[in-house]
Image (cartoon, coloured by chain):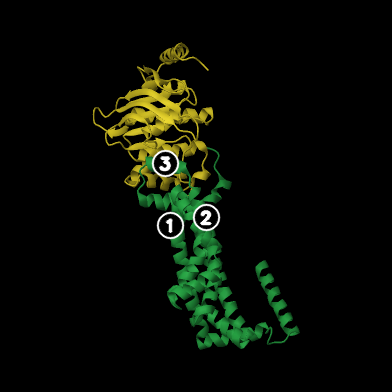
Amino acid sequence: MIRFISLTALLLLWQLGASLSDPRRLPGPTAVFEKVYEEAVSGALFSNLTITLARVVAAFALAMSFGTAIGYVMGRNKLADRLLDPWLVTLLNLPALVVIVLAYVWAGLTEVAAVGAVALNKLPNAIVVVREGARALDPHLEDMAQVFRFSPAARLKHLILPQLAPYLAAATRSGLSLVWKIVLVVELLGRSNGVGFEINMAFQLFDMKLLLAYALPFVALMLGVETFLVQPLERHVSRWRRGVSRRLDRV
Amino acid sequence: MNDTSRAGDGASLDVSIASKDYHSAGGSPLRALEDLRLTLPAGQAGAVVGPSGCGKTTLLRLIAGLDKDYVGTIVLPEHGQLGMVFQEPRLLPWRSVIDNIRIAAPHAREDDIAALLDEFGLAEHASHFPRELSLGLARRVALARALAVKPDLLLLDEPLVSLDAALAKDLREMIARLIDERRITTLIVTHDLREAIALADRIFLLSPRPARVVATLDVPTPRRALERETAEKIEAQARAIYQGSSSPR
């Protein structure tokens, strides 16, 4: 409810701003939503959103799987940590733009270069977070699993993943927002479709309506992913923590 | 340097440790165990008793195979399937009580698990998460889990510590009944001599660090058959050994 009021206030503020300024500089909500409708009917909005979302998903999946594997190894193995840490620090401090431009120069203006560049930008962040999680694994439970001879699969499923879950959730949250922002830059610089490309077009034509008509649905889409996918998943994996309050102290 | 094997000679537990050192960061190594020998016949319960900090838990970790850095040999009972109850129950907090047992004992039959839960009064807690349980209940779950794997050797690390007197008594009786009925070779580590006398067929008294077995006492009529005088006699015997052999610190 409070969220709804706050959102309405934002819309009103936008309307107010639009009525005070040149509609070409800041078009009002109605004009923008009309444009959204127009683009949706033509099919362009849907296809561009899908393409961008596919790039987000691909880059995110790549970064998370490699980041989780590398972060786990670095968190568990001191030698690997010391060997890879300088690389990690370098990658962490490399500006996203540099990675993107280098990827396009070396691999051409291709889909692989685009997705790879985004994944490479997210990778060090995933590694750092998962490494922290791997370092925090409980050695007592590890001993227990060894005594009871857990199979590797059971160890992964029941011992390691539940302990890494909060770290994976944190990496997912920060990762999704980072990835989709960088995907737009990649599209702007070297792709001929997607939301980033359309925004670049709008910028060239100084078409603010078009720009907002692509930006807003995409923000809404990512908010939807966060609210309906990431958050419920997080609640599901952390449901065992809620038990503390209703602890049964009597035997 | 060491050898943990599973031999079949009478299927007993045979421990013979020449030495176990801890290597602290930049200091002289600390000797935890030295020339420690103990033998436990199959189907019997042994209790390792010693002053706190003498290396009882270290010994248990060696027997459990969690620490292989020692000189000596440890022969486990045949098949060598271990069931262990740690001092802290060490249940998976993100899995329910029954899933904790299922995961540790993937080959156990569902009705066997149900029977175990019943036996330990845990049936109504099967779907609870470990954090919802008191320590007494959590220990019982850990015990049920250790039994679910049908162990050839059951290791109990201070199974009654930090429980109030009534709960400790309940759990002690439960463990005593279990040993009598199932005849699982069991090794209990405890700092409490009376607890050892109440549960064990054979008691191993450890010296202060570096620990070795200073005496092995047999309880002629263990557990339920134990009479008060026998218990008191053994207790006096043990105290005499401690006063005679080791210089108190």
How many marks the image carries: the answer is 3
Query: For the residues marked 1 and 2, what is the alpha-carbon distance in whole angstroms?
Result: 16 Å
| Mark toward the start of the polypeptide (1 vs 3) | 1
Q: Which mark is residue A69?
A: 1
Q: Residue B43: horizontal and vertical position, in percent?
A: 31, 28
Q: Report which residue position mark 2 lands on.
A: A166
| The hue in which chain A appears in the rendered picture of the protein | green
Label 3, secondary structure: give it: helix
List x then y, in percent, for residue B217. Answer: 37, 17
The answer to whether residue B148 is left or right of residue A128 is: left
At mark 1, the secondary structure is helix
Under mark 2, the amino acid is: Pro
**Location of residue A26 in the rendering, given as x and y in whole percent from the top left corner:** 69, 83
The residue identified by callout 3 is A144
Q: Is residue A25 visible?
A: yes
Disc 2 secondary structure class: helix
> Chain B is shown in which shade?
yellow
| Corner quadrant of residue B231 | top left
Chain at numbered mark 3 = A
Along the viewing direction, whichever of B120 and B30 lies nearer the viewer: B30
Residue at x 38%, y 33% (from the top left corner):
B62
Amino acid type, mark 1:
Ala
Chain letter behind tag 2: A
